[in-house]
Image: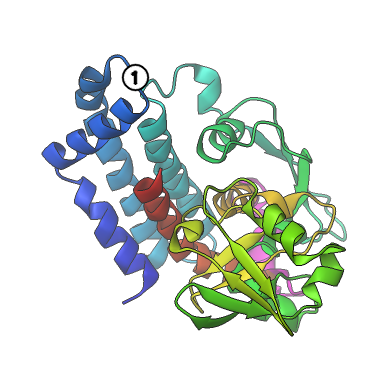
């Protein structure tokens, strides 16, 4: 069974009013929200419709040509994110400013444009900043703009194509058994630190307890709950069922939760698909650089990874 099939089957469980109302009620009580019962009834249909709408977008994207996929996938992911926010914030959206995307892409230069070098800028207000704060407790991002190349490097399923084109990637850890992984001791040199400090770094932003033991190699004991957020320097690879350790590049992208990474790339691609038609269609016909295969690999990956990340998130938060 594909990850996408499994994720959508689990998300389909929320298409029962009684179950979902109880699910939201429990979440709101945990938040100690004073109007928990009323809000759970009020928000239940919205929550269900957001997930249903998202599934329609994703299903259409699976069948659509590449030129339309980014638009459908971006709006599908946005609907999934809004459902996750509604579980954490019963009043969402409390203002119209939260409905804006919260990011901007720069206007494409007509000559010598490279998708990998393109950047996206984070705005102070809007969905992206609110999602970062509410879902991942990231109020102030280290950087306010990110390149597509750095963002793609934070998706572990893209390790193979990125390596082929000699681009930056994370470091794959070897799976030894249930929750046990190994990596070269040279990882410590990359981080200029020792195992205890690396353990502290990897646990930042996560309630999961990670243990690192150093012998000839490094041995990582990573609980299942860590993959739920796929946040920080460790990202979960659904293809290989292992983790990749991000390299610190100074770009700040390595600290982003992977859901945030997918949102940013899809936003930029959806804007290109809508407003840069000449470049977008020419790319698909001429395929002059590595831009096309990397975009293709990303779109194939995000079709399954986006729903997986949300399903894991709804289960854990």
Q: Sort mark 1 into few (<14), some (14-19) or many (20+) by Cα contacts within 10 Å.
A: some
Q: Is residue 273 magenta?
A: yes
Measuring from the top left, give residue 233's x and y in whole percent.
67, 58
Q: Nearer the viewer, residue 164 or 210?
A: 210
Q: Is residue 314 above or below residue 177?
A: above
Estimate the x, y position of residue 55 in percent, counting from the top left: 32, 53
The residue identified by callout 1 is 33
* Magenta range: 269-291
Q: Quadrant of residue 184?
A: bottom right
**Which secondary structure is most common in the magenta stretch?**
helix
Query: In the figure, is residue 87 to the left or right of 110?
Result: left
Element on which disc 1 rests: loop
- Whether residue 176 is visible: yes
Q: Is residue 316 above or below residue 165?
A: above
Q: Residue at x 14, y 44 (%)?
A: 16
Q: Is residue 107 visible?
A: no
Above-or-below relation of 213 to 124: below
Q: Is residue 118 magenta?
A: no
Residue 238, percent across and down?
48, 71
Q: Nearer the viewer, residue 282 or 207?
A: 207
**Depth order, front residue of 221/135:** 221
Please name the residue shown 54% across and 36% down the image.
Answer: 131
């Amino acid at each position: 069974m594909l990850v996408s099939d499994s994720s959508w089957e689990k998300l389909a469980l929320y298409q029962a009013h009684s179950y979902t109302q109880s699910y939201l009620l429990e979440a709101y009580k945990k938040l100690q929200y004073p109007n928990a019962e009323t809000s759970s009834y009020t928000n239940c249909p919205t929550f269900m419709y957001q997930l249903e709408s998202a599934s329609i977008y994703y299903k259409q994207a699976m069948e659509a040509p590449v030129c339309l996929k980014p638009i459908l996938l971006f709006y599908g992911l946005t609907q999934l994110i809004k459902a996750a926010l509604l579980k954490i914030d019963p009043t969402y959206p409390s203002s119209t400013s939260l409905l804006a995307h919260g990011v901007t892409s720069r206007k494409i230069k007509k000559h010598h444009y490279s998708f990998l070098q393109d950047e996206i800028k984070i705005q102070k207000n809007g969905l992206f900043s609110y999602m970062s704060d509410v879902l991942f407790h990231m109020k102030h991002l280290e950087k306010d703009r990110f390149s597509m190349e750095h963002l793609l490097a934070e998706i572990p399923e893209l390790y193979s194509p990125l390596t082929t084109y000699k681009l930056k990637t994370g470091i794959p850890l070897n799976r030894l058994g249930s929750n046990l992984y190994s990596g070269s001791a040279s990882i410590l040199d990359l981080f200029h630190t020792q195992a205890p400090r690396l353990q502290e770094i990897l646990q930042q932003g996560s309630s999961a307890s990670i243990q690192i033991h150093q012998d000839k190699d490094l041995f990582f004991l990573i609980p299942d709950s860590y993959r739920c957020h796929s946040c920080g320097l460790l990202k979960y690879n659904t293809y290989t069922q292992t983790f990749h350790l991000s390299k610190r590049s100074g770009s700040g992208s390595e600290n982003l939760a992977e859901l945030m990474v997918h949102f940013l790339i899809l936003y930029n691609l959806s804007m290109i698909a809508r407003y840069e038609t000449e470049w977008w269609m020419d790319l698909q016909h001429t395929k002059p650089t590595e831009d096309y295969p990397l975009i293709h690999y990303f779109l194939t990956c995000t079709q399954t990874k986006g729903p997986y990340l949300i399903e894991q998130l709804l289960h854990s938060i």
